[in-house]
Amino acid sequence: MSCGDVAVHNWTLSYVGDTLETTDFDDSSGGRSYIPGLTSWSGSFDCYYSTGNTFAPGTTYTSLSMLMSTSANDGFKGNVIITGEDIGTPVDGIITQTYTFQGTGALGTST
């Protein structure tokens, strides 16, 4: 994964699933019942600041791939909407850009 021409040095992915309650008045077990609902995913990625980084908040990007460092062929991919950009400027370090995103559609695997 890259930000323009600059490699990403950190990323996070949150993949969650809704649960839908199906408890009814005939349920005598005393506990609630659930079934799986829709899933959603979001995350963020960090890169070093560059004017070549072209991700823009509010823009949809298709087939963004995030590969895990344990294998060059194992990771996740999907369509995302960039929801934010933060730029950090430490006094004694490298300027960084952090992008947040919301996945849209299914989260796939890249193998």
Image (cartoon, rainbow, N blue to C red):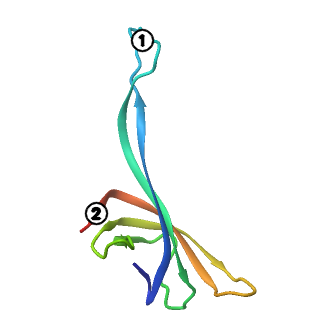
| Relative horizontal placement of residue 89, taking residue 34 as reference (left or right) | right
Report x, y in % for residue 91.
Answer: 75, 86
Q: Secondary structure at mark 2?
A: strand
| Relative horizontal placement of residue 95, taking residue 48 as reference (left or right) | right
Task: Identify whether 96 is placed above or below 60.
Answer: below
Disc 1 from disc 2: Cα separation: 39 Å
**Label at residue 29:** 1
Q: Amino acid at mark 1?
A: Ser
Task: Identify whether 21 is placed above or below 49.
Answer: above
Task: Identify whether 48 is placed above or below 98.
Answer: below
Report x, y in % for residue 49.
Answer: 57, 86
Badge 2 crowding class, 10 Å Cα cut-off, few under 14, some 14 to 19, many 20 or more, is some
The residue that disc 2 covers is: 109
Task: Please tell me which residue is depicted at 49% across the width and 86% down the height of the picture.
Answer: 53
Task: Please tell me which residue is depicted at 52% across the width and 72% down the height of the picture.
Answer: 57
Q: Amino acid at mark 2?
A: Thr
Screen quadrant of the C terminus: bottom left
